[in-house]
Amino acid sequence: MLVELTALYDGPEPGLADHRLSVGSFAEPLKLLLSALQRTASGILTSALGDPEYGGRGGSLAREAGLLDIELIDIGQACAAPRFVVVARRDPREAQGRLALDDLPARAAETLVRDLKAESQGKLQNAAARRYLGAMPTTVTRQKYAVFLDGTLLIEAEFGTPALAQLPNEGPALLQEIGQVVAVGFEPGASFVTIKFGEKTTKCSASAATVERALDLRGDEVMAVVLITKEAQLVSLRRAEEQLVAPSMKSTIEHLDTHWGEALRALAQ
């Protein structure tokens, strides 16, 4: 049983017109695509096998979902059109390599493509699919996906720039964490800095000056201040061991008077 997942990425993102995928721009989205496939498989197993504890403690069912992988076998000549096979790797801890559901790779891929279409229209369907779409470079303006089982088309979906739903409880948050710079992007493409915080990797939009700063800090532990809104924005970046110098009272008063004096005087009245 051969399960193929094809994608097409189109838009002004550098490299697409030459049928190439940038590792800096697509490594994180493709990692999230695999995560979305595995989480979708988890949901399918939970429903099919009727185990309410599925995945909660990393049991055998969770391991089965984690065995799914996507392998790149070709990039077509229409913009950038990667073609993957969806496979289930054998768990070396198990005596037999069969999945509880033999058709899990096909069902997971088909469901994921359906969920990607729904999420692109602002319908809350699959959080993992939404994270994948949200990590896609903004310069990708058209996406197309299809799933084939032994050459037979199971599902196809195409859409432009996703209109992702804004969750009601989502609000701006300012985070300060220590991590490492793992990737950057700069003009003529999107300016961004990707930082790994422990097991979590966050792609942040950033100014050109901040990208330059990030290049200087690659390999060092950094203290990053990130504003979380609809997307992550890198506010500041410095070496983790650098100590911030507190401004004097005089400079603080001068700053407040220069930038906020009029507003403060209005409030005082």
Image (cartoon, grey):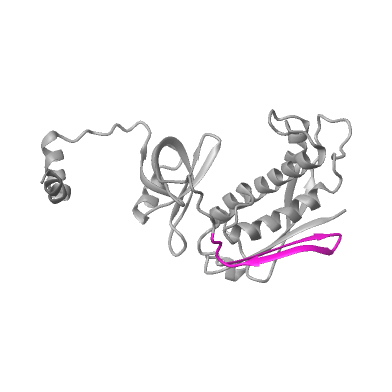
Range drawn in magenta: 142-163
Give the image location of residue 61, x and y in percent: 77, 34
> Does residue 11 appear left or right of residue 102 in this picture?
left
Point out the residue furthest to the front here.
269
Answer whether residue 162 is magenta in the image: yes
Give the image location of residue 150, x and y in percent: 86, 60
Answer whether residue 79 is magenta in the image: no
Give the image location of residue 5, x and y in percent: 74, 58
**Image point (17%, 48%), residue name:** 260
**Image point (85%, 63%), residue name:** 151
Whether residue 192 is situated above or below residue 239 in the rendered picture = below
Give the image location of residue 251, x and y in percent: 13, 40
Figure quadrant of residue 10: bottom right
> Does residue 101 appear left or right of residue 254 in this picture?
right
Majority secondary structure in the magenta region: strand
Q: Nearer the viewer, residue 44 or 131?
A: 44
**Image point (81%, 47%), residue name:** 104
Q: Which of 241 and 105 is in front in this view?
A: 105
Number of labels in the image equals 0
Figure quadrant of residue 159: bottom right
> Does residue 228 appear left or right of residue 21 in this picture?
left
Whether residue 234 is situated above or below residue 73 in the rendered picture = above
